[in-house]
Amino acid sequence: MRCMWVALLVTLSALPGWAQSLRGDYIEARTCSVYAGGCHYSGEYVTAGREALLFWHIREGKWNGTDLSGVSVLTAVVADNNLAEPSAQRRSVLYIDARASQAQRDAITRLFNVRYRDLLGEIRSVKAVPIRFARQERQMSVEASGVATLQVSRYPCKHCVQPHQVWYQPLAPILEAEVASAKLAAYRDRQLGTVWQRAEENSVFVGEFRLN
């Protein structure tokens, strides 16, 4: 009986999707302050917050047998309402680091269509662009060539904000989300019919993501 169970586990572990797991860094920059006074929040809710840049840097892991370690992915998302509204109609563009192989790009595309379908809405296109990610102490930066720039500064500690003035939750599930400041969050590609640039705002969530 023991041998039968061992054989079954070995067989299942070889099936696509059985032992797949990813982990890495996540950055989310919205076009509204996620940490602010009540009046500031209420004023922005109906006029802003319809766009976001979402970034995943996969530190390690495989998906459906494809090793995705080191791959960076950026998405730009726009909606017809504040992204906090469940009814907001979303559309997006998926940008995958140009250094990724074709197999990695295919795996990422399938993964995001399945796991982040509601978050991203209609994915208008998938593009390969050079993406640089840097992290040093509490500073983080993302540069997607010709597409977007993120310069993020995390607060000195995880508890340096007043919880009752954090008005939103991250759009994607992450562990121990922290509010951070966007020194610059800019989107330059016109694929979605709009561009934006915001600076010096408490408009960012950072954390670690895990997908199993």
Image: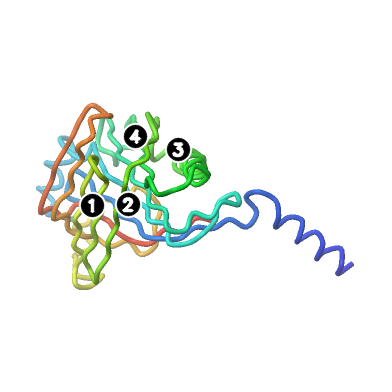
User: What residue is shown with label 3?
Assistant: 117
To which quarter of the image does residue 123 belong? top left
Q: Amino acid at mark 2?
A: Pro
State which quarter of the image contains the N terminus. Answer: bottom right
Nearest the viewer among 83 and 111 is 111
Q: Amino acid at mark 1?
A: Trp
User: What residue is shown with label 4?
Assistant: 92
Q: Position of residue 114 (x, y in %)?
A: 51, 40
Q: Nearer the viewer, mark 4 or mark 2?
A: 4
Determine whether the residue tagged by mark 4 lies in a helix, strand or loop: strand
User: What residue is shown with label 2?
Assistant: 170
Q: CA distance from mark 1 to mark 3?
A: 24 Å
- Would residue 179 be found to the left or right of residue 113 on screen? left
Which residue is at a point 23% across and 26% down the rendered structure image?
Answer: 193
Q: CA distance from mark 1 to mark 2?
A: 10 Å
Q: CA distance from mark 1 to mark 4?
A: 23 Å
The 10 Å Cα crowd at callout 1, few under 14, some 14 to 19, many 20 or more, is some
Nearest the viewer among 203 and 126 is 126
